[in-house]
Structures are given as C-alpha cells and as structure tokens.
Image (spheres, grey):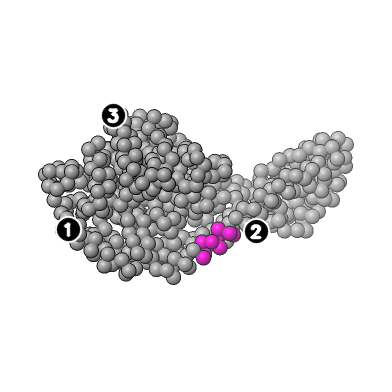
C-alpha cells in the first residue's frame, strides 16, 4: 500500500511542471487521478478501517464519474433527479455566469432540481440573486467576514423545509445548510457544506480536530434519521491522497463508519500544476445507481458537478413563451386597414367617454386581429434569459461558452487568457445592457400618463392598457396625434417586437 502511494506521488511530483499532464484528456484516463481506482487498489490490512478487501464498499456498486462538456452530458430520464453542486467563490461576482451556465444546460433539456452552492461570500440583498423557478435558502457567516457561506436553490414546485437541527454553522470550521425534500411522498435530505482550509486562530491540527468532531456528530444525526441523505460541497480534503495523507484517511474512514460513500472519482480543482479532488458528493442511500458528471468550465477554479439520481419524481412542465407576431406583412396590413377607416362612430358622438370607448374598441380589435398572440415552446438558445438581453448578447454568450469549453479542456494559458478577456468584456456588456434597460423603464414610468403627448406610448405597449384621461376633450386630437402619424412611420418603433 505504502509503496503504491509513494509511486503515485513520485509520479505526480515528476509531472508537476508539465502542464500537459493536468489537462482534461490526461486526467480522464490516468489511474493515478482516480479515487475509485485508489480505493479498489488498496490493500486494507494497514488501514484503520478495513481488514478484508471484501469489505470494500465500492466493489459491487454501479458508480460512474466522468468529465464532460454540457453538450455531451447524459440526457435526463423522466425518473432522474438532478443535483448541481458548485463552489462559486462569490455569488455576487459570479451570479451572471451561474445563470449563463444553467441557461446553457437548459438548452439541452438538463434542468437541475436542486442547486447546491458553496462560498457564497457576503452579499447585499437576496432579491438580487433569484433564479426563475427556484426557491433560495442560504446561510452566511455571522461575523460578516469575507468568504464562506452556503446556499441551496430548490425547484419551486417541490415541497421542502430547512432542517435547522442539521444545519450547523461554525464560521471558518464547518458551514452547512440542509433541506428536507418531499418528492412523490418520499423524503430526502440534501445538504450543501463547506470546510475552509484553515482558521486564523487555530493550527491546522486543531482546525481539523474541531471539524472532525462536528462532522462526526452530523453524520451520526443523519444516520439516525433513516432517510436517504445527500451531502454536496467543498471539504478541502484531497481524497486522492487517501492512502498516504492521515487527514484524508481519517475523513474517508469516518464516512465509511457511518455508512456514507464519496461518489466523485476525478479531480475537481485543476490548474496547470495541480489536480485535486476536494469537491465531494456523499450519500448513505442504499441500492444506489450513481452517475456524476464534472463539467469542464472556467466560471470558478472549481468545476461544477451534476449528480444524476434515479428515483420517482415529476419533471418540470414544458415552458412556453407568448408573443405577438409583428411581421412586416402584418404591419402593412394593419396600416392599410387603419388608413381605410372613417372613424365615423368616434366623430359622431358628442360624449368624450363614448368617443374614447369607440376608438379604443376599434383600435384594439384591429390590433389583436393583425398582431395575434402566438405561443411557442421556450427555446433557451433564442429566447431572452432576462428582458435586457439582446440578440447580440445571446450570440456573445454562446461564443463565451465555447471559449470556456476550449480553455477548460486544454488548460493552456493562452486559451484561458483568451476566455477571461472575452468573459470580462461580455460581463461588462451585460451590465451596461441591464443598466440601460432599467434607466429606460424609469424614464417611461416617471412621465405623467395624463398628457396627450404620452398617450401613444402608453396605448401601444404589448399589453394594451386603456388610460382614461380628462385632457382629451375633443377626439380629433387623437386622430391628429395618433392615427395620422401611424400611417407615416415605422410601427416597429412603438410595438417593440421581441427578439427572435
């Protein structure tokens, strides 16, 4: 056992300055960087937990773990339950990139049911970090110090509560949040967990001892619940060193003693000079069929992980978008119809309100006739993630994702620099687009809607709102300010058709 371990780490040391060793292709096939291979190759006579190779808990289980880009991820089966886990290293800084990543998954019909995040860091307002279709639960450091913090997004149609008894949170030692889920009358416990690598007031030995005591109590509590439990997080313990690092050995043996298994096999944090497996998926579920996919992306220096769990559950219903068809043909027909109207019912009435009602009835009827509502299945490649996204930003986002895939696979400095430069420019453009969008909204909403000059803008928004105004005493003003200009100008300026 010791000879085998020394061989591994001599090999790793000799490869330390060769960046090609730590690219994804090599890590995928090198047995020295496979946790399951290390466990299965171990002679357990010298370990603290095993005395017989037949006791190896991994020997008869169907557990898979591999690297993948998003387009090559396994498809979701109707009974799969999908959990996404990721050390985000500041949700405030990386939230837009997280949404892009989830959006890209959605283009391939891969929609997580649960999203576990570590190292949220401090952030100002949880309302800024809402993700459509999810509920957000989190815990941050009470000391307000930077770093740490854990959170979980849960699909909004799932019944869930925070399990406060399990959600122990000791700043800089062990930070957790646990959710109890009810999926088709079956209970599950899901936790997001973070163990910082050090403590400013404790030695490494004292820090690990404090963690071990808290973590042992947590595993004991989970085991007593007799409920399938899943723990996801960054433990800062490289389990590839199981055979020759006392802390890694103690950690894995502690898991085994409470009936938990660690399911991730490949390094989850990679640089040009190192590859470590510090992001873990732990479970005590019986008869487990597990498939974990490590996504090669550069959003953080940790790779995100998708964990597919087979079990009964209902899938998310198909989403649709509803919009009006502002084609050139429909625009021309609408203008021609307006030009042919005499508006007799509007002009013949002596009552202002009656004239207004007649006008609105005619206009809105023609509007709905020529620009009917159309419903289509939501396509994440073409429909907006947020209202400030333009067609150009959607294209830029796809370019950024492709550059990310190339950089994650090659790990070359040139590809990483190219990706980061483009990512920074893209993020800047997204922020500018968002700022312009809200500035425009503020300008539109601060105006006095009773002024005739604003009537056209108010009337011709996508969802027509009839604004009654006392200032429109004579309806010929409507014809002068509204009907005639419509026949002369491009209606696109008013109707604002959605981007394809």
CA gap, disc 2 to disc 1?
72 Å
x then y, percent, for residue 61: 20, 45
Magenta stretch encompasses residue 473: no
Mark closest to the chain's N terminus, 1 or 3: 1
| Residue at 21% from the left image edge and 52% from the top image edge | 243
Q: CA distance from mark 2 to mark 3?
A: 66 Å
Quick one: label 2 or label 3, which is nearer the N terminus? 3
Secondary structure beneath dot 2 equals helix
Of marks 2 and 3, the one in the foreground: 3
Find numbered disc 3 in the image and state the secondary structure of the residue it sits on: helix
Range drawn in magenta: 421-429
Which mark is drawn over residue 158? Answer: none
Q: Main secondary structure of the magenta part?
A: helix
Foreground residue among 124 and 420: 124
The residue tagged 1 is 4
Do labels 2 and 1 touch, CB within 8 Å?
no
Q: Which residue is mark 2?
A: 328
Q: Position of residue 392 (x, y in %)?
A: 57, 61
Q: Nearer the viewer, mark 1 or mark 3?
A: 1
Would residue 422 be counted in the magenta stretch? yes
Residue located beneath label 3 in the image: 224
- Label 1: few (<14), some or many (≥20) within 10 Å? some
**480 with respect to 438 (left or right):** right
Disc 1 element: helix
């Amino acid at each position: 056992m010791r000879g085998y371990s020394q061989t591994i780490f001599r090999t790793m040391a000799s490869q330390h300055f060769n960046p090609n060793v730590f690219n994804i292709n090599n890590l995928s096939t090198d047995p020295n960087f496979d946790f399951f291979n290390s466990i299965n190759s171990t002679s357990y006579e010298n370990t603290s937990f095993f005395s017989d190779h037949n006791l190896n808990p991994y020997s008869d289980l169907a557990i898979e773990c591999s690297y993948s880009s998003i387009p090559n991820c396994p498809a979701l089966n109707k009974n799969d339950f999908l959990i996404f886990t990721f050390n985000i290293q500041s949700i405030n800084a990386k939230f837009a990139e997280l949404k892009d990543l989830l959006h890209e998954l959605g283009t391939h019909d891969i929609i997580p049911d649960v999203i576990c995040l570590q190292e949220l860091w401090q952030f100002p307002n949880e309302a800024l970090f809402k993700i459509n279709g999810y509920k957000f639960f989190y815990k941050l450091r009470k000391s307000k110090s930077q770093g740490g913090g854990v959170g979980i997004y849960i699909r909004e149609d799932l019944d869930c509560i925070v399990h406060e008894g399990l959600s122990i949170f000791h700043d800089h030692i062990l930070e957790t949040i646990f959710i109890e889920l009810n999926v088709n009358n079956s209970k599950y416990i899901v936790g997001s967990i973070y163990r910082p690598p050090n403590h400013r007031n404790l030695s490494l030995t004292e820090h690990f001892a404090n963690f071990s005591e808290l973590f042992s109590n947590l595993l004991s509590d989970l085991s007593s619940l007799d409920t399938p439990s899943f723990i996801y997080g960054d433990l800062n313990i490289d389990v590839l060193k199981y055979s020759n690092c006392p802390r890694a050995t103690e950690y894995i043996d502690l898991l085994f003693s409470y009936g938990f298994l660690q399911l991730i096999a490949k390094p989850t944090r990679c640089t040009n000079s190192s590859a470590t497996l510090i992001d873990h998926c732990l479970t005590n579920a019986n008869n487990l069929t597990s498939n974990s996919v490590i996504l090669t992306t550069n959003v953080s220096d940790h790779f995100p992980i998708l964990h597919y769990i087979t079990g009964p559950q209902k899938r998310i219903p198909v989403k649709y978008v509803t919009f009006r068809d502002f084609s050139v043909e429909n625009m021309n027909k609408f203008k021609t119809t307006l030009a042919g109207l005499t508006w007799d019912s509007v002009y013949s009435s002596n009552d202002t309100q009656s004239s207004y009602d007649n006008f609105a009835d005619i206009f809105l009827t023609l509007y709905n006739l020529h620009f009917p509502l159309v419903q289509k299945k939501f396509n994440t490649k073409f429909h907006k993630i947020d209202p400030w996204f333009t067609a150009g930003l959607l294209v830029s986002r796809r370019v950024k994702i492709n550059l990310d895939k190339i950089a994650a696979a090659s790990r070359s400095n040139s590809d990483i620099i190219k990706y980061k430069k483009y990512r920074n420019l893209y993020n800047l453009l997204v922020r500018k687009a968002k700022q312009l969008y809200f500035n425009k909204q503020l300008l539109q909403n601060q105006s006095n809607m009773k002024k005739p000059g604003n009537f056209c803008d108010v009337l011709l928004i996508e969802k027509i709102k009839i604004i009654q105004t006392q200032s429109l005493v004579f309806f010929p003003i409507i014809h002068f300010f509204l009907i005639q200009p419509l026949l002369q100008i491009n209606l696109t300026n008013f109707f604002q058709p959605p981007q394809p």
